[in-house]
Each structure stands twice: as C-alpha cells, then as structure tokens.
Amino acid sequence: MSKHLPPANPFDDDKLKEECGVFGVIGLKDAANFVALGLHALQHRGQEAGGIVCHHPEHGFNSARRFGYVRDNFTKESLMKTLPGPLAIGHVRYSTAGSKGAVIRDVQPFFGEFSMGGAAIAHNGNITNALALRKELIERGSIFQSSSDSECIIHLMARSLQRNIPERMEDALRRVEGAFSIVAMTRTKLIGVRDPLGVRPLVLGKLGDGWVLSSETCGLDIIGAEYIREIKPGEMVVITAKGGIESVYPFRPQPSRFCIFEHVYFSRPDSIIGNQSVYETRRQIGVELARENPVDADLVCAVPDSGTPAAIGFSQESGIPFAMGIIRNQYMGRTFIEPTEQIRNMGVRLKLNVNRALIKGKRVILVDDSVVRGTTSRKIKEMILDAGAAEVHFRIASPPTAWPCFYGVDTPQREKLLAANMSPDEMAEHLAVDSLKFISLDGLYRAVGEANGRDKDCPQYCDACFSGEYPVAPSDMIEQGFEVEAAE
Amino acid sequence: MSKHLPPANPFDDDKLKEECGVFGVIGLKDAANFVALGLHALQHRGQEAGGIVCHHPEHGFNSARRFGYVRDNFTKESLMKTLPGPLAIGHVRYSTAGSKGAVIRDVQPFFGEFSMGGAAIAHNGNITNALALRKELIERGSIFQSSSDSECIIHLMARSLQRNIPERMEDALRRVEGAFSIVAMTRTKLIGVRDPLGVRPLVLGKLGDGWVLSSETCGLDIIGAEYIREIKPGEMVVITAKGGIESVYPFRPQPSRFCIFEHVYFSRPDSIIGNQSVYETRRQIGVELARENPVDADLVCAVPDSGTPAAIGFSQESGIPFAMGIIRNQYMGRTFIEPTEQIRNMGVRLKLNVNRALIKGKRVILVDDSVVRGTTSRKIKEMILDAGAAEVHFRIASPPTAWPCFYGVDTPQREKLLAANMSPDEMAEHLAVDSLKFISLDGLYRAVGEANGRDKDCPQYCDACFSGEYPVAPSDMIEQGFEVEAAE
Amino acid sequence: MSKHLPPANPFDDDKLKEECGVFGVIGLKDAANFVALGLHALQHRGQEAGGIVCHHPEHGFNSARRFGYVRDNFTKESLMKTLPGPLAIGHVRYSTAGSKGAVIRDVQPFFGEFSMGGAAIAHNGNITNALALRKELIERGSIFQSSSDSECIIHLMARSLQRNIPERMEDALRRVEGAFSIVAMTRTKLIGVRDPLGVRPLVLGKLGDGWVLSSETCGLDIIGAEYIREIKPGEMVVITAKGGIESVYPFRPQPSRFCIFEHVYFSRPDSIIGNQSVYETRRQIGVELARENPVDADLVCAVPDSGTPAAIGFSQESGIPFAMGIIRNQYMGRTFIEPTEQIRNMGVRLKLNVNRALIKGKRVILVDDSVVRGTTSRKIKEMILDAGAAEVHFRIASPPTAWPCFYGVDTPQREKLLAANMSPDEMAEHLAVDSLKFISLDGLYRAVGEANGRDKDCPQYCDACFSGEYPVAPSDMIEQGFEVEAAE
Amino acid sequence: MSKHLPPANPFDDDKLKEECGVFGVIGLKDAANFVALGLHALQHRGQEAGGIVCHHPEHGFNSARRFGYVRDNFTKESLMKTLPGPLAIGHVRYSTAGSKGAVIRDVQPFFGEFSMGGAAIAHNGNITNALALRKELIERGSIFQSSSDSECIIHLMARSLQRNIPERMEDALRRVEGAFSIVAMTRTKLIGVRDPLGVRPLVLGKLGDGWVLSSETCGLDIIGAEYIREIKPGEMVVITAKGGIESVYPFRPQPSRFCIFEHVYFSRPDSIIGNQSVYETRRQIGVELARENPVDADLVCAVPDSGTPAAIGFSQESGIPFAMGIIRNQYMGRTFIEPTEQIRNMGVRLKLNVNRALIKGKRVILVDDSVVRGTTSRKIKEMILDAGAAEVHFRIASPPTAWPCFYGVDTPQREKLLAANMSPDEMAEHLAVDSLKFISLDGLYRAVGEANGRDKDCPQYCDACFSGEYPVAPSDMIEQGFEVEAAE
C-alpha cells in the first residue's frame, strides 16, 4: 500500500497540520489493543504513520511501526499478537515539511536499551534546540538512527548518571527546549510529561484498574475510559500498575501558554479542553465572527468539514439559514489521471461538489477555519461562482495566519503564508471575492472563554502563528537564519 | 488488499443499499479516465467492486475489473494505459445479499463477442425473471460464466436473429422484466436504456464533443459535463461519436414509477432528480416531519451523515437549534481487535463519538433517514443516554420500511425488517426511546413535490418497500415462495 | 507479485516450450491438495499460471486460478480450504506465443454449467481447428469468455443432444482435430482422454482407493501413487469413485505418433515413458551422439541443466571426462538493471558462470539438448572462450529443429528457427565454433528404442519439428497461410 | 511476500549455513547496481535478507534493506533509483539460529553518523566478544538499535578519539575478537578488512577504473571484473576512487587459519580460493574419498546439488559409473498442505524424486558433502530403498561434524550434531545403511592441497567443526557455559 494516503480532510494541503498524537496505557490486559483504538481516535493528528511499543513480563519489549492508517495496520490479528502485555504506548505522526521521503526508522516511539533496562518514548510537539543537542551528542560518540528530534531525549537519557529511568528522563528534559507532550514507558512504568508552557495537550483517564494517557479526550471516549484531568504544564506523571500516580515538576514554573489553534482546528470537535467542548468553542467563534463581521446574505455554508461548527454559530447569531452548499465526496482520492485539460479544478472536484440547485442565484457566506496559502479558497470561490452564486463572502474562524509555527505544527515557510504578504482587504481583492473577513485576535480569545480578550502583557495562549510572539525562542531556526520580528 | 473495505457510511450494515452505479462516455479522448472519475463520483452506489470496458479503433476492446474502491484501482497509470480509446463504460457494485463470496467474474460490465463484433453491457437494477431466462438459455446450450442476472441479456443478444447489435439488444430487452438502467457499448456506439417504469435513474450529459451517461448528475459535475436531460422511462438512446443521439422505445408504454427511496437515501445530496435538488428535497422531508411529528426539545441532531439535510429542515421548521451532537470518525474501520469485553458498543465507537459536553442534560431529537433492522438506532440511543441526555426522540425521514426491494436494492429478508413485525409505537418501546415517529407516506410524497400526496390508484413512484405494492411482479421470487400480499 | 517469474530453466527463452500439464484425482479426501502436489511436480510443463477445479457433494463446484508458481499459490491454507471434496482436476500452463498479455480467464480448467449439471475440463495440447469451430459456434449464439482453444469443447458439449456429460464429451471430441490429452470432471466422474495419435502423454495411477491421472509419472511419485499404465491413444477413460474405470474409444483407430521431443526435453528425467526411464533414454542419446560425431577433446560439459544426461552418456561412450564446466546460479533472475554497458553478456551471467579454472586451456565439448534460435549457443560459446578454452565443440542431442510445432508446444515462427535457414555446417560457421554436430533422426529413433531407426513410411513418433511431416493437418494455420511443404 | 523463501538448496535445514556475503564497489557509475549483481552472485551465502548503502556527492548516503532474495528486491527500478552514486556496499544474510523473528533493523549494512561524516559497515563472520563489548558500551551511554554483533563496531568507532574514520575503525577493530571479513565505506572511501586469522574470505577485483570487494570470486565474474588478489589475513585496505589502494595492518600478525568448510560446502563451485578452483578441490575430495573408502557397487550418485563434484571425482577414481539417481525439483517449496497422512516423506518428495527405473536392483553409492543432524540422510536412504535399490552406501566428503562453529556459521547446538554422539559405525547402524564412511581430516587436507595432510601443531586451516580446536576463544559462549574440550 502506498505511503501516501488520501487525506480525510479535503483541504489538508492548504491547512496547518498537527504533527502528532500520543497514547499510553498501563494496567490493562493486551494494552496494545487499547493503544491501537486510542491512536485510531487520534488519527486526525497524524496520518502518515503509527507505532506501538509494549512490554510483557515474559516476552519483554515488542514494537511495530507502520506507514499508513492505524485501521489498516493495527487491526490485524497476526500483528497484534506480537504486541502482548499490560503496558504500551503509541504514536501517530504527520511527515514534517522538511523531510524528503519518510523512512520507517523515523516513526516513533523510539526505544533505547539502558544498563538498567529499556525505555520507549513518543512525543507530540517539537524540540526547538534539537539540532544543537544532536551535534553535541554526536561529538560525544552517540549514534543517531533517525532524523527525528525525539531521538535526542533517548541519547540524553543514555548518558545521564542517574540510576533509574524516570530520573534519567528528568535529567534529559532539563536540556531540551520547545513544546512537547510526551508519553514514555519502562518495563513497569507509564510516564507522561508536558512542557513547562503546556503548549500541546495531554490528558489522563482511567479504565477499570488501568490508567490511560491521551493527546485528547476523544481517545478516552473510544475505549470508554473516564476523563480524570489534564496533565499540568511542566508536570511529569509516573504511573505504576499497582502504586498509582506520582507527580514531579522537573522545570522552573512558568505561566501556561496552551496552543490556541487546538481550539480552532487541530483537536476533534468532540474533545474537551479545559472543561470546554471544542465543538461549542468553535460554534462560539462563529457567533463572535457574525458579530464582528456581519453581512447581508441568503445562506451560510461551511467549507467542509472543519468550518461546520463555526458556520452553525454564524447562522444562529445572524439568523441567515445554514445550508450544505458544498458536499464532500466520502471516497476522496488525490491521484486520478486527468483525462484532458478540459476539467477545470479537477483536484477540488475529486473532493467536493457544489450543490448547484441550492446555490444558484444566492448570496453565499462561506465559513472556513483558516486561510493558509489561499489556494483552496480561490478554487472554492470559483466553483461557487460557476454554480451561479450571486455573491461570495468569506468569513474566517481565526485571525490571519502570518507566522510559521515551530512547536510541532507543519506550516509553510513564511513567504508562502498569504497573510504574511497581504492585508485582509488585499487578500479579498487577490481572491476576487465580494468580502473576506477574519475574526479578531480578541474575538478569538473571547470565544475560547477569556471574557476580556487577550492579555497583551502576558497572553493566556500561544498564538505565535497569528501574532509572531514566540513564547520559546526557536533557537535552531534562528541559527538557520529565521528572523523573529515580533508583530508590534 | 482486502475485498472488504471500511464503509464510508458508518451504518451501512443497517441501511438499504443501492446495488450499482453506471457511467458511459463517447467521443472524448481517453474515455476510460472520464469513466473512472464518474464512477468515483458514483461510489456511494456500490463499494465492493468496479469495472471498465473500453474500445479503441486500433487496440480493440479492453477491460479491467477490480475489487475495492475506484480511487484505489482506477488511478494507476499502469492500469489506465491499458484502457485506451474514445468510448468506454463502467460500473460500480455492491455485493448482493444472497451471494456467498464475491468473484471477479461477477463484476460488470459483461462482454460478449458476436459474429458482427463485440458488445459490453452494465446495468443498475435487477432482472426479476433472470432465473427463468437462465434455465431456458442453458437448456439451449448457452454457457454462463457468472451468477449475475445481467449475463442473461448478453446471451439473449447472442441468439437474436437481428443483424446489428442495437436491434439484438431490443430483442433481448423485450424478454426481460424488472428494473434496470443500462449503459452498453459496441465498437462505435454508446447505448443507454431505462426500464419501462423508469425505476432506476439515468441521465445524459455533454462535454465538448462528447456525450456522457451517468446514474446521477453528480457524475456529470465531477468531469464538468453539462446536464442535458434524463433518459426517459422505456427509452433506449443509441449515441455515435459523430451522428449524435437516436431514440427508440422497445417497450409498451406505461406510467412511470421512479424509486422514491433515491430521494430519501440512495442518491447523493448534490445530485438533481427531475429538476429538484436532492438536498432540498431531504430538507423539505425534515420540514414535513417537523410538522407531522412535533416535540418539545433542546437540540436537533442528525444521525451522521445521511440524516443531516432532514435534521436541518426539522430545525428550521421547529425553531429548535441544530447541533452536531454525534461526531463521525473520518477514519472508520470495522475490524479492530476488541481488547477485552470492557468496551461497550465498541463497533459504534469506532465510527462515531457523542459530543458529551453538548448533549449532557439536553432533550435531544435525533433525525435519521430510515430504520431497517433497528440495531443501529438502539446503539446510538445508548450512547446518547450514556452521555447524559435527558430525553431521546427519534424522527425518521421515511415511512416504516416493511417490505424488501427486488429492484436492485439490497434489503434484509422480510422477517428481519423491524417495521414488518412492529408498529411504530412498539418500535419505540422496543428501542426504549422517549418517542419514535416516521414521516407519513403522503408527507413523503408532498416533500418530493406531489402537493396532493400519493395517488392511491396510480402511485407516482415505486414505494414497494413502504407499501408492499410491487409495480413489476418479482416472478423469480414468487417462484421461490415469496408472498406478495399487498398492504391495504 | 509479478506474473513474470524467473524461469527455472536458464535458457527458457531459447527452448521449445511444452505448454501444459494436467492432473486429476478421484476418491481421495481433499483431492485438491493432491492435485496441487501433482501440479507442482508438473510445473516444468507450464510456469505461467495454474488452476484447480474441485467438487464436494455439499459445497458443489469450486475453483481457483492463479498466475505464478503452484508453490506460491496453492500452498495457502486459506485458499485450499475453499477447494474441498474428493474429486478435483488441475492444470499448469505456459503462455502461448501469440497472446498479448495473459488474462486470468484464459487459465484452465474451464467450467460449464449444463442442464444436467456442471463439468470442468483441462487439456494439454492444441486443437488445430479451434478457430473454425469458434467461428461456427459464435454464429450459432455461443458467448466465448476466453481466447483459449479449449473453450470450444465446452461449447460443443453444451450444444450436444446427448443426455449425459460423458456422451456429450464424445460428441464434442469427434468435432475437434489436433493433439490433446484431457482431464475432465463432472460431479461424480473423473475423465481422461488422449487424441487418436496419442501425441501428448497421460498416465493413470492408483493411491489407496483413489485414482489419479497425470501428464507424467513424476506426478504420481510425488504423492506416492502407483503407476498403473498409460492412457491409450484414442482412449477415453471414465472413472467413478466406487465403480472403477470404464474405457471407450470415440475415434477411428490410427497408428500412434507420440511426440519424440518429450523424450528429448519436455518430460522430467525421472519420469517413465512406455517403460523407459527418460533419463536413461537421454543418456543413450549421448551415447549415440558420441558414436555418430566423435571428436578429440579434454572435457565433456553439459549446458545446464537439460543437457546433463546426454553429456554423461557422451562421456561414458567417448571416455572423455565429464565435468561441470558451467555452473548455474540457483537464484536466477531476469531483470536486473544493467549498471552500464560495461557488462558483456549480462543476461547469461545472471543465470550461469563458467568454471574458469577448469576450462582454461582445455578443448571442451558442450552437449546441449537442442538449438532453436541459436542465441544462447552463441553467448555460451563466448563465455567459454572468454574463460580461455582452447576449442569449443557443440554436440546437440536432437536433430536440427527446422519446423514449428502446432500440437501444444510454443515454437518461434519458422523464419526464426536457425535450422530452417542454415545447414549444420553453416550454423557452426555462424556461431563461430570449432564444430557443431547434431544427432541424426535415425540415431534419435535408435536411442528411444527403435533398433532399426525411423520407419519412413509410417514413422513411429511425431517428429514434425525435425521432419516437417505433420501427422494432423494444422488447418487453422493453413487457413492463415502457413505452407506445409514436407521435407523430402 | 513472505520472509520465508523456499531454499535453493534442498537440504538447507540439515546443513551448516554460511551466514553472510559482502560486496563493495568504488569508482563505477551507479555502484549500487553492481552491488546488487554481486550480492545476487553471493546469494548462496545468505538468503534471508539483503541491504545496500551507497553515497552520492550530491544526494549523500542512501540505503535500502529488504527481506527476501536480491533478485526480488534490488531489481526494481523505483528502488534502485533511490540508490545513486559511485560508491556502495552491500550484504546478504541468513538468520542466526538463536534469533526469534527477524527484524529489518538487524539487516546490514549498519550506518553511523560521526562528527566528521557518515560511515557504513557490513561483515561476514562473528564477533566472539560482542556481548561483553555491548554491555560495556551501553553502560557508557550508547544506544543499540539492533541485536547484531556488527553494531558494536560502529559504536566503538563513534567513541574513538581519532580524527578520521579509517583510524577510528582501526581503533575499533583492536577491541573485537572473532572471525570477520568487513566491507565498509565513508563518503569517499571503500574499506575492506579480514580478521588476523583470515577465517572468512574476501577478494579484491578491478573493473575499468573501479575497484571491487567480494566474499568470493563468483561475485567478480558476474560483473565481468578481473580478479586481482585476496585481501590478506589481518589486512585493512582503504581504497579511494582516484588514489588507489592503501594497506594497513591493525592487528598483531598470526599464522592464517582459513575456514576449511568453505572448500567443502560454503563457497560456490565456480569460485577460486587461493588459486584453486573450488569445483576441482571438491572433485579431488571425491578422489581421496574413493581411495580411503572403496566399495563394490553399480552406481555413484550425488545427493543434489552440493555432492555432485565429489561424486564425479569418486566415480572417476573408482571407475564406477556416475549417474543422476536423484532428480531435484527445480520449483521447490516447503509448505504444501499435506492432504492426508498417506504420503510418506512428503517433505523430501517436494524437493526431489528418485530415478526409479535407474536405481532398481542396483548397489548405489551416495556421495554427500556432510552429515549434520542426519535427518536428511535417513529420508534419502528410505527413498532409495523404496525405489528398489539393492544396497546403499554413503560416502561423505567431509570428516564427522562434531563441534559447533562460532565464527559466522549457523550450526545446531552440539547435542544435535549426530557426530557428537556417535562413531561413524554407530551412525551407519543408526541410519540403517549398508555402509557410511567419512573422508579423514588428513584426506581433506590433502584434497585442498596440503600434500602432507594436517599439521597437528599448527593446523593450516580452521577446522574447529571437525576437531573442536577453536583458534579464537569463543568468549561470549564460554561466559554462557559452553565447554571447549578440545578433541584429543
């Protein structure tokens, strides 16, 4: 099977992409099967590859890494039989922008054998000083097997002078910078860590006598586990099957800066973040958007599928009827052979179709979650106009995306971001639409529950992709010439 | 690759299933590529297998038949190169209920070599006297290569005394009974036929100098073809690349009886039937449903994905807010290994998740398109209640499905149909929901545009699955003991 | 897996190729497993594809057809479980020269459903009037599903007026001309037939209570069956599990003309033909060859692997030591990417290597079984000379192959046969070898046991490839312009 | 494709197995293609998996590792295109006895990134102190990615204080013990090493401007390279494309101890070792065997295929005719489903067949290369007797194999070796043959060219498998309890 699967989201190639999801289980028979289910629920966080490592008292550590969907790989009895034991962790990932050609040895979790036993580790996020660490470790005699930033942690652990693995991990974590939610395991322990700012999510759940770690609560739901709490920013939990949970805080405390884009797009709408339904937050974004940027029109339509909750909110606030003006093809594929040049916008047609009879002669509001390169927005506008719409108004459920993310999200280079080069009005003109409006940064903060909007002196979230204010200096990138010129 | 793909619709196993889609192109370079695209757009009509036959003046007839999705098979350059020429037809199919184990030789189109040249044929529907015809043909020395009813037509054509293929097809068609929309081809002609009642759909389109036949208009949209008209009930069109279209009417004229379930579920919402948008018809069904069966509640939710247009209509008519209470997993799979018995309703959890934070404490109206066996309705109710809903009210966008279809739709045996055994109130009690209401047959007819409802003496549609009134006697089935006792 | 497997014989592309092997079993539990083993033993008779049809009283007829080796397909438990019952037949085949691109529906056995039940048929050989029969049958309304000559027999049977299947087969056989050894089956009978001249082999064996038909005795050996006798030319045996064997003779009696090339090359050396060991016959050919064409030399080497028995005989008769001068690579492959043009004779090097240290400075006799196009002979000579041989003398264990075979053997067109264009001396000069000698036709007849050589008036064997005397007129070929100008 | 391929040698499971072959090329365009060819020629040294690493000035290092035959993997254009550049090394391997389940990360060559650039390494042999080294390295913070002994060398190199890679390798080699022939590469250099005793082979060749390293000369022949010389025991050659070859000697000099079993079985008969043809040496072993152990009989037959040269020699010395009494099936497979228990010795029948007509009533000498467990000898004897042989005499072309090899050969545990438990006469009785004789150790030494036989004080070869005298202490094995009690 090809490594390159059709994406479940039709406009993946014009979206910011979460790079990873992590999941771990301890204290449940055949833990790897639970991990497979959890990863399936987290598949939207990474579709390129998945991996599971597990441990069984008799059969030791075992692992499997595969390109492709969890459902196509980790459902085979022959494979799952090779993954026994009550303790397992797993990982799904996207390919990162820079890598040319994925290789299986880059697929997490990573495993290392120490003198006191083995350990496996998987993370969601990005270590911003990984290149510097790698250089230093190679000079001291470490052999790297992958191009992944995560492998640094294993090598730092191997060289720690501590006598047990969790303490070695603490040693290692104190050397790394960036955004990371980690699940790790030894022969007897499941470990979860969030970076000091808590940029990426990680939640704790309970099922029977077992404990579960998951990037999102939807991973708990699929196995029927109870949601207990979020892992705190800077917290490291060490869980044993019998002894329960112990918390340590390896880092200097800092105010948290959770990624606000998880609310906008990355997380699944049925997940809960900080006691808020993601769906409800998105609907509320639509409400704010309608208040900030009203327009007279006949229909509110979503750009499927991620724009739907905000479109519903926009409709409810504005009183303009919500309708399915664009229908997604459930059997998407990318790679049909174009028979001739006669088919305009063939790429988009494979993914969706305009509801012509509905759209014809109407003034249409299109609600989308974000504008990255703008290539998709242009094609959708064309299809809507081809179908006979009278007017097309874009309403975007996030502020202009003007800065790349260095914390585990795949973003184009800055010069490719439409908002890095144009004002919203220029963008509207560029896309030739009747209007194009974004929610304000303050409006977004209000929608996620900050009644007073963004605190300029100490923002409650990481919003670097909108503001250019990077809460952790991306030191490897700066070394390579990236200029952080914070938006004033 | 496995023959058994995850379904794109999460509740496929508890739905009536359209068995086929057909598509044909003449007069366009590399016609097979257009057919592949058209079949991709018709994939919802049959997911088990697909086939294409084409003809090239130099390379003659070529064909390919494959199990699995169109996007996984007919996108490979190596395969498509073997399908050259300006004339091609194709077919997607479901497996029929009765067959034990699919074999590739049952995959259409069928091909036959006659003394005046070859012909290929594919159809959507069911020939109700196929077994009797088959018996007769075997006794006269025909060798059947498949278990498909369609092969009869080829053998009847082989034995016709006519000197050209279209006339041989007319001969053959006069012997067959049932519901069928056919696309066929000779070396130089594309042929389309609808049965005298016009039970199954077939439309004509135009792209540049070429002509297109498709089960639905969404197949025209994907290739950018213009929708010209429907093929008429009982019409046979014979199209040549240069000479255009000729119509003949091989059958005795009859009032048309189009399948009303195409409006309810089979067709894609972005298709147009008889100048009506399918999406708009379904929304209107929701409106009628809200009028006939109002209920006091907090939220209107759709059972994804097919219930959504009716749910929107219900919300608009009732004023109760529409919300995404059930979120579908975009990466569905059927076959995960159940780790223990701890996971309740695991099968359903793989496909969707309840939006717990939204549902909790609410009175929820669930709009679904139909109830077949009722197994899914029960599981969804349980998940909604587990998530803390205060009340659950089902509203069904079609009348009770009490009779099997013999016209090309895969239905369970009569005794498995919940509505064949219970009244709506008994069903509500059986499913333990607060209420369960169906749209009336007259309400459905109004929604599809018959202002005065159903004409009892001469119904405007085939509604046998609701009424038990079969417009064509299913003679093979009657031979096998099926009792047609029309509901009074 | 690719359809195109590396050949087990290194010089397959410059050999005459037997096109088929057949095998059948009745009265043994899980008969298909025995058939798989038998076909494996007959794999040298056809490597492109294999098929098995079986019958079980409860599960009816089942079949499987696959491209590739028997060992790669018919060893899988999942497949073999679908082939139950005490009665089965099977077939292995080569592709025929003329066909462009193999298709699975051409793979035998063929199956037909008649009004009195089904029958399957497989054959080794060629029906020389197949095209004429096909034309006639199509005109009468038969639909052909393959391009194979064998399918004619099924259609002729379908149209027979007889009331049982063996008698229908007799009817059909009386219409066909050519060379054919058939195994066939009904629900309760195993049937074996040889054409009136007995051109192709077919033997009968017994294992426990069961009966076995096989192209060669090596197929009996692998399952431990006892060799009973050959089916006689013109004989049709009808075997039932309980009732034993019945013989009928549908054809007019004729003197037999067994294919003499089966002795030279086609059959396996461990098979027995007419009470003679094939190995011993080939050794005896080497003896005759040494007597007819002696030469002073240091070593006798075989062109592997088929030349070995004759080379041993040549060595024993001449007293010149036998040696392995050419070593075959056991892991042959055809399709390596040529790194540059630096590698001379790369194709041959992939298959074998000269034993340089042995050959250097020696006068070498190379014994090969036949010369077809001569391309291989040239390459081998070059390798031997590159390795430093002083002289190279070819001795060929068959007379010059100057005529194509139309009886189930894949031969190049006449103009490609080296011996059709040159005398042996011209061939020696063309190949630039020190000498090149063939066994005489009489010598070959003596080696196979005819002490007085060939009977010119009534030859004991079919030797058309050497003599141009075709015992059955190849009528389809003559229709297409082939000129039979018998060598005088 | 399955990892478990049918073996090319029919009795692989009752043979000692060479574990690896190595090959390297510098200075030729598309070097990886040459390496693929070379590995194909060395496939007999390891059939489980193969790997290639290459370097291109622009595209850097690239690699591919695959389970299965070279011909099935490294012949695909899509793969070979990913392996550009003028410098490449490769490796084929067997699985080692102890490993449970092969994993791709154990497939060589291994690659390591050092601060001064990358290096790759592959070896044939075994490092006898690998476990001790591994333990030490892990304690110092190295992370091992495989279970292979070879990985130690990379980690030792990573920790060396030297400033260039060849010197780091010298550092590393001085820490390892055992038998090893290494090919390695940096960005610009091809490196070859043999251990101080020269236990395993490695030869140097030249093709155009390029240089080649290969385990055997047959690897040079396939690409048409000229054989230059053997790498000397203890020698390390460092080759650059332009500068040619430099030799260093990192080890303390010792008398050489080449593996005598390479002559008996491991090497291909068309290879040359120390100016001797392997084929000729084996023939000479047959001559010595006939002199030491004559017997009156009718036929000399080889156990195919490895016994053939010795059988020819035995026949020539004894005057008893050589014959092909056992015919090997060229399409061997292991895993047919046994239809019933009726088939005796089914496993052996899949691989070969006795030439019944030849054997019947004869006194047969069977020449085999070795007896390991004796399981195969017993089955062959039974088949020969079943075919009616009057007497069966085994003659074995090597002394009794009584000790395991720890130098890169897969041998059963000592207690499984028949000769560790029985005298030759007991073995004859155990196998129930008329006689069973082995060549003497002195006879074997004479056959390989030592006119005075074995030098007891300082044996010219490693013959530990016969004598129990291990030239390098197998320290890891001794640590695990193996008792080296040298044969008296």
Image (spheres, coloured by chain):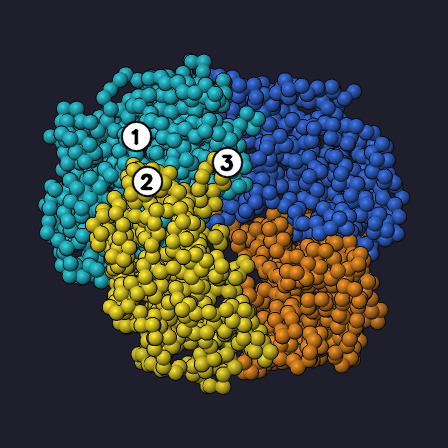
Chain colours: A cyan, B yellow, C orange, D blue
* Cβ atoms at labels 3 and 2 below 8 Å apart: no
Left or right of D370 on screen, residue A97? left
Residue A150 position in % (x across, y down): 37, 28
Q: Chain of mark 1?
A: A
Q: Quadrant of the C terminus of chain C?
A: bottom right
Viewer-proximal residue, D462 or C146?
Answer: C146
Q: How many numbered discs, if any?
A: 3
Bin the neighbour count of mark 3 within 10 Å (Cα to Cα): few under 14, some 14-19, many 20 and up.
Answer: few
Residue B368 position in % (x across, y down): 34, 53
Q: Earlier in the sequence, mark 3 or mark 2?
A: 3
The Cα–Cα distance between marks 1 and 2, rounded to whole angstroms, is: 31 Å
| Residue indicated by mark 3 | B340
The Cα–Cα distance between marks 3 and 2, rounded to whole angstroms, is: 27 Å
The Cα–Cα distance between marks 3 and 1, rounded to whole angstroms, is: 30 Å
Bin the neighbour count of mark 1 within 10 Å (Cα to Cα): few under 14, some 14-19, many 20 and up.
Answer: many
Residue at 27% in and 63% down: B447
Q: Quadrant of residue D5?
A: top right
| Residue indicated by mark 1 | A200
What numbered label is drawn on residue B389? 2
Q: Is C168 rendered above or below residue A173? A: below
Residue B99 position in % (x across, y down): 53, 61
Looking at numbered disc 2 in the image, what kind of residue is underneath it?
Ala
Q: Is C381 rendered above or below residue D429? A: below
Q: Quadrant of residue A82?
A: top right
Q: Is residue D20 visible?
A: no
